Image (tube, helix red, strand yellow):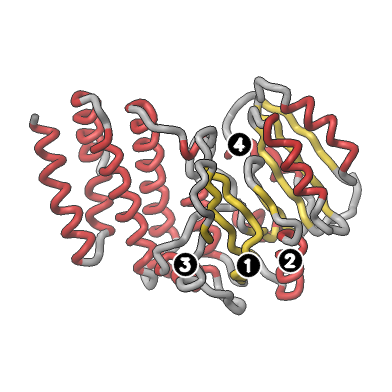
Amino acid sequence: MSSFVPQLSIVVAVYNGEKFLSKFFSYLQAQKLQNWELILVDDGSKDNSLKFLYEWKDKFPDVTILTQENQGVSVARNTGFNVARGKYVAFPDIDDVIDAKMYPRLLEIALADDLDIATCNGNYVYADGRPSRPIFPSSRLQTTGILTGPQWLEMALNSKKFLHVTWLNIYRREYLLAHGYYFEPGLHHQDIPWTTEVLLTAKRVKYIDERYYDYFIHSGSVSHTTPNDTIHVRTIHNYMKILEMLDAINQKHKEVTQNIDACYWQIAKEGLGIIHSIGSIQSIEVKKQMVKELFDRGIWSLIWQNAKDFRLRWRLGRRYFKLKRILNS
């Protein structure tokens, strides 16, 4: 095995992405990087994605292609991360736009300041023609100096505009390995607990208010598919798991989180999202089943215990009686 250590490993999960891959690869070609590796994980695609990967392989200096049965983006990222060699690692999505300056700029600040995590801003871009907008408004979050991870997490969560994502960041690989950080298999929106715990233990983090990534919101995106009852139930179960993971993270790192109210606030906030999803279910019987699970599984108690301010408790109190009416209907 080569002892060469790339500056950056770009790990890409691919599932039925043939319509995005040509543009995605063109964005990577535009990155002015001197030594880096590209790790492509085909997650059991049913289209021509794997064929596209091999067609592009020779157009990059250092490419590894891995294949696996379909197991979801978390497992695909883990598979790619397991073979990564770079000093830093990135996890972009194939259906988004990456500015040519993104990875050179993040590497510049990461290497200069020996960062565990370097992070930038981006844009929401809408397929339906709505104007794009920054993910983090400059009025809420501005460029920082070197912070600890908990300092940045508190600042970001307190902005009420923070988005838990991996694709705006690069991570020092040895830092992730030292803490044993991997993505939770089978969990949609796994970036929420991942980002929370990774930041709670990071020593050196820096944010730059420079927009280098366009997050494309379209109907084909898993995160933005028009919901029906089946999707609502799946979302509810995912977020129940996320709340349990966030609570476990808060307990594991209690010496840090006990001083960051926002770590508890985000559990209550995500809990309100669960309750909203329950309210959107059309089937009365399915809605009742979800309310029963909310109470029986202890999720309601978890939400209530983490709502530490009056406004949140007032909002939850109103919803409590509505939930009980559904349960008793």
SS label for mark 1: strand
Q: Which of the two discs, 4 and 3, sits closer to the camera?
A: 3
Q: CA distance from mark 3 to mark 1?
A: 15 Å
Residue 323, quarter of the rendered image: top left
Whichever of labels 4 and 2 marks the residue nearer the N terminus, that label is 4
Tag 1 residue: 210
**Residue 75 shows which numbered tag?**
4
Q: Residue furthest top?
A: 46
Amino acid at circle 3 = Ala
Q: Where residue 10 appears, x then y in whole percent?
A: 74, 49
Q: Are marks 3 and 1 in contact (CB under 8 Å)?
A: no
Few, some or many residues within 10 Å of mark 1 (<14, 14–19, 20+): some
38 or 257, nearer to the observer? 38
Q: Are marks 3 and 2 in contact (CB under 8 Å)?
A: no
Q: Where residue 263 appears, x then y in whole percent?
A: 39, 62
Q: CA distance from mark 4 to mark 2?
A: 28 Å
Q: Where residue 307 appears, x then y in whole percent?
A: 25, 60
Q: Are marks 4 and 2 in contact (CB under 8 Å)?
A: no
Q: Where residue 229 appears, x then y in whole percent?
A: 32, 27
Whichever of labels 2 and 1 marks the residue nearer the N terminus, that label is 2
Q: CA distance from mark 4 to mark 1?
A: 30 Å
SS label for mark 3: helix
Residue 205 in view (yes/no): no
Tag 2 residue: 105
Tag 3 residue: 156
Whichever of labels 4 and 3 marks the residue nearer the N terminus, that label is 4
Residue 173 in view (yes/no): yes
Whichever of labels 3 and 2 marks the residue nearer the N terminus, that label is 2
SS label for mark 4: helix
Amino acid at circle 4 = Val
